[in-house]
Image (spheres, rainbow, N blue to C red):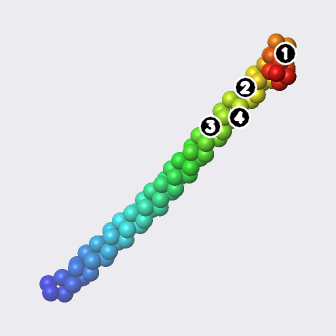
Amino acid sequence: MATGAPDSQARFGQSVKGLLTEKVNTCGTDVIALTKQVLKGSRSSELLGQAARNMVLQEDAILHSEDARSYSEEVSNPRVLSSLLIYRTS
């Protein structure tokens, strides 16, 4: 019986070693997948921030163009134009 014990211990050791190797490989794969998701989320956050900044810039451009248009319409209005001329000459 003494000769059978080391053999079963060796098989048990190999079995445990195989299970641990499998577990380590699974954990490594999970870490890689998690890292990819974090990087993807970080990139998505960057793109969202950039889109928000671009929207604000576009909104400002629209507001300024509306202001310029209304000023242009006011200046081209004969009543406003005559008021400006009267103001300048006085």
Above or below 34: residue 74:
above
Q: Residue 26, how many percent across, how many down?
A: 40, 62
Above or below 70: residue 8:
below
Q: Residue 79, how many percent across, how many down?
A: 82, 12
Q: Which residue is mark 2?
A: 66
Circle 3 sits in a helix, a strand or a loop, which is it?
A: helix
Residues at badges 2 and 1 in contact (C-beta under 8 Å)? no
Report the residue at 33% width, 68% height from top. 19
**Nearer mark to the viewer, of 1 and 4:** 1
Report the residue at 26% width, 81% height from top. 10
Report the residue at 42% width, 59% height from top. 30
Q: Residue 36, how many percent across, how many down?
A: 51, 57
Q: Which residue is mark 4?
A: 61
Q: Which residue is mark 3?
A: 56
* Earlier sequence position, callout 2 versus callout 4: 4
The disc placed on residue 47 is: none
Q: Which residue is mark 1?
A: 82
Query: Can see residue 70?
Result: yes
